[in-house]
């Protein structure tokens, strides 16, 4: 993205004894939500084991198969959306988005779907490395890419175990998010070189909306198309010291849902992670979901305001590896997502 297991604390309810006066109950934290951070960690490691998932490589292809088969095992209907987008240098780039549908119970099938998304590709260049000789080496992208996907794979597993599924969920794992202009590039600068998979997906939604409008159909009346209530994007959500402030575009286009997510985090005891500080605008996949597809979408992203880039020290370097992935952080993020989508 462009960058301008432990259980929750249990609340003990104190009962009065004899004639002793009752004590006022402390403010309660919401009950734990089913999500396994260790399992999400395994899914992150499973992606990283393929090596850098650079579009066009065997590792990228094999990772698509791994993710798709895993999601199908949890009952998801998986499709691969393909297309061509122009890269930063004007060349055409093949794009393959992984789309997985998780159905609601029969009494809830008419409800709009919740969009959950992340990107699964990894950056072809470590262009933030201090040593110029290392900048042409692709990165593992354990956090910048695989962490969000790992959380959503575990969300799909937990979804398959729910007794009640109140709303359809569409998981979209975007390709070519990290193909944006490298820092060392000196050629002609192009706009919108990041988030190519999200742009492709959003344009497809936009075209369907226009087609429905031209034929006199509203989205609600078009039975063949998915209607979306809102979306949540996960990006760099595995660092043990991760902090998720309220991102500018998220507040601008999806402020109501930012509030809902951050309240859920507070109720679960994760206000230390989901902080109320606001970031500068970040060009991430959600920007195109908001502006092209017109689906309000929130970006949960690790932002570090005191760094030179605004992002963690390992961002777009060879150090973006499993050393920066914490099952505890994955679990906290995953529990917030599960609470929001099934409340």
Image (cartoon, grey):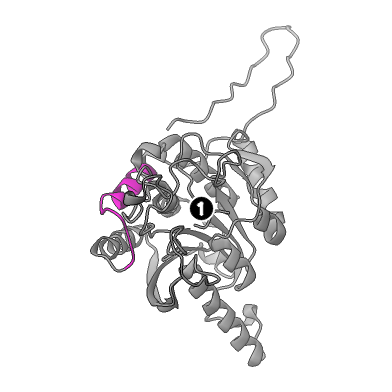
On the picture, is 52 further left or further right than 82?
A: left
Residue at the outermost left position: 58
Q: Which residue is drawn at 58% across and 68% down?
A: 288
Q: Give percent across and percent down for residue 176.
A: 42, 66
Residue 54 lies in the magenta stretch: yes
> Which contiguous range is marked in magenta?
40-55
Residue 138 lies in the magenta stretch: no
Q: Residue at x 39, y 72 (%)?
A: 95
Residue at the outermost top position: 19
Task: Residue under label 1, please give it.
Answer: 234
Q: Give percent across and percent down for residue 208.
A: 56, 83
Q: Which residue is drawn at 58% across and 54% down?
A: 4
Q: Is residue 235 above or below residue 292?
A: above
Q: Give percent across and percent down for residue 300.
A: 56, 50
Q: Give percent across and percent down for residue 123.
A: 39, 57
For label 1, count other residues whose C-alpha is less than 10 Å away and answer few (under 14), some (14-19) or many (20+).
many
Would residue 248 be seen by someone viewing this image from the given angle?
yes
Corner quadrant of residue 228: bottom right
Q: Which of 105 and 323 is in front in this view?
A: 323
Q: Is residue 139 above or below residue 218?
A: above
Would residue 111 be seen by someone viewing this image from the given angle?
no
Q: Which of 17 and 280 is in front in this view?
A: 280
Quick one: SS at disc 1?
Answer: strand
Q: In this view, does 251 lie above or below 288?
A: above
Q: Which of 316 and 38 is in front in this view?
A: 316
């Amino acid at each position: 993205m462009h960058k301008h297991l432990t259980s929750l604390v249990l609340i003990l309810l104190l009962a009065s004894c004899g004639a002793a006066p009752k004590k006022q109950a402390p403010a309660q934290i919401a009950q734990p939500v089913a999500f396994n951070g260790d399992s999400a960690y395994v899914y992150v490691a499973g992606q990283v084991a393929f090596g850098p998932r650079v579009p066009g490589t065997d590792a990228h292809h094999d990772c698509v198969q791994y993710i798709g088969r895993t999601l199908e095992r949890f009952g998801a209907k998986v499709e691969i959306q393909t297309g061509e987008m122009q890269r930063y240098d004007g060349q055409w780039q093949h794009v393959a988005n992984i789309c997985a549908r998780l159905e609601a119970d029969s009494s809830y099938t008419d409800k709009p779907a919740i969009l959950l998304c992340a990107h699964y590709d990894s950056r072809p260049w470590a262009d933030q490395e201090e040593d110029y000789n290392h900048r042409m080496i692709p990165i593992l992208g354990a956090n910048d890419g695989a962490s969000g996907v790992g959380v959503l794979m575990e969300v799909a597993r937990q979804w398959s175990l729910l007794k009640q599924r109140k709303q359809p969920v569409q998981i979209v794992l975007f390709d070519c998010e990290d193909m944006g202009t490298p820092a060392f590039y000196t050629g002609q600068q192009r706009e919108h070189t990041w988030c190519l998979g999200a742009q492709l997906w959003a344009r497809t939604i936009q075209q369907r909306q226009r087609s429905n409008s031209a034929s006199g159909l509203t989205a609600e009346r078009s039975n063949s198309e998915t209607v979306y209530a809102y979306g949540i994007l996960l990006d760099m959500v595995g660092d043990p010291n991760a902090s998720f402030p309220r991102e500018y575009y998220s507040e601008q286009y999806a402020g109501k849902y930012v509030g809902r997510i951050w309240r859920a985090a507070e109720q679960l005891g994760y206000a230390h992670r989901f902080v109320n500080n606001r970031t500068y605008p970040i060009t991430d996949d959600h920007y195109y979901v908001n502006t092209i597809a017109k689906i309000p979408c929130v970006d949960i992203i690790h932002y570090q305001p005191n760094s030179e880039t605004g992002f963690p020290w390992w961002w777009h370097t060879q150090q973006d590896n499993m050393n920066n992935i914490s099952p505890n952080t994955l679990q906290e993020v995953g529990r917030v997502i599960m609470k929001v989508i099934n409340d």
